[in-house]
Image (tube, rainbow, N blue to C red):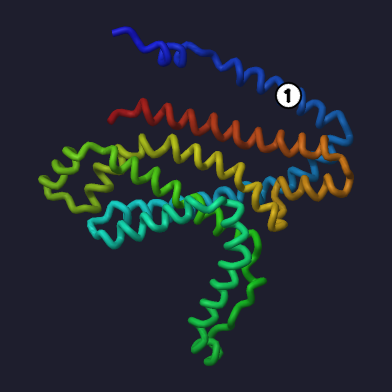
Amino acid sequence: MAPQPSLRHEKDDRPWWLAVLVLIGLVLAVVIITNDIYTQVFRTVVNGAGITVFVTLVAFMLATVLGLGIALLGLSDSIVLRQIARFYIEIIRGIPILVLLFYIAFVGAPGLVAAYNLIITPLAQAGIAEPILVRDLSLMWRAIIALMIGYSSFIAEIFRAGFQSVDIGQIEAAKSLGLSRYRRFRLVVFPQAIRVIFPPLSNDFVSMVKDSSLVSVLGVADITQMGKVYASGSFRFFETYSIVTYIYLILTIGLSLALRRIEKKMKQMPR
């Protein structure tokens, strides 16, 4: 049977868009190197790249772990656990990330600190532990917690769909072999589900790189915040936000290409 037109086109297409993009990137790199203003802007803004990468990696890893836990609760035999998971997912998905960021930073963090201090009251009275202040929980970690919670609900749905994509017959066969629930998950379900899970999960990773820019509203010194500070002081908004855009494109497109390559290798692996 002849291949579908869309699949044939996808196979035959050359990445001309990438060649054009690389060419534009090289031209901009030359401009940054040769122009003193752009060089100064780049050196200032790129100082926030470390914070952006750190926030993205930590928040995404925590969100993945939490999302996996929520997904497993949602697939539990207990109706109570399933309802708790569904309640969490629907509530968190209905809150914009920016609103969640403010809520966690200025409502959740003080509540968490108050709860901690309440729990350790006997230890504090005995001189074993000391209470903490709200300011002891940095704004960067408040932002990480907010991104973790916000993305965990979407990641939970990705995991759920991936696990449910596995043929029920294979799970029943594993049961008949006497495999425990954990071993069925580790040896049968997860290896097959990861092929379905990885593409949308990698898309969420790239999205978190972009959404990490929202932490700048809390004054966290990421790429966006460094650009805002420089632009407000120099009034060079065009140069500054052009550089900010350039750096984000390098991060997101480079990451997308790397993840796409991994995805292709996973598809070529034997089932």
The residue sitting at 14% across, 47% down in the picture is 175
In the image, is residue 244 above or below residue 60?
above
The residue sitting at 10% across, 45% down in the picture is 176
Indicate the quadrant where residue 110 lies. Answer: bottom right
Residue located farthest toward the left when viewing the structure as drawn: 176
Instruction: Give the image location of residue 203, x and y in percent.
Output: 50, 37
Is residue 141 visible to us here?
A: no
- Tally the marks: 1
Q: What residue type is labelled 1?
A: Leu
Left or right for 163, reference 114: left
Indicate the quadrant where residue 207 lies. Answer: top right
Indicate the quadrant where residue 163 lies. Answer: top left
- The residue under label 1 is 26
Left or right for 164, reference 108: left
Instruction: Give the image location of residue 241, x and y in percent.
Output: 77, 38
Label 1, residues with CA under 10 Å away: few <14, some 14-19, many ≥20: few
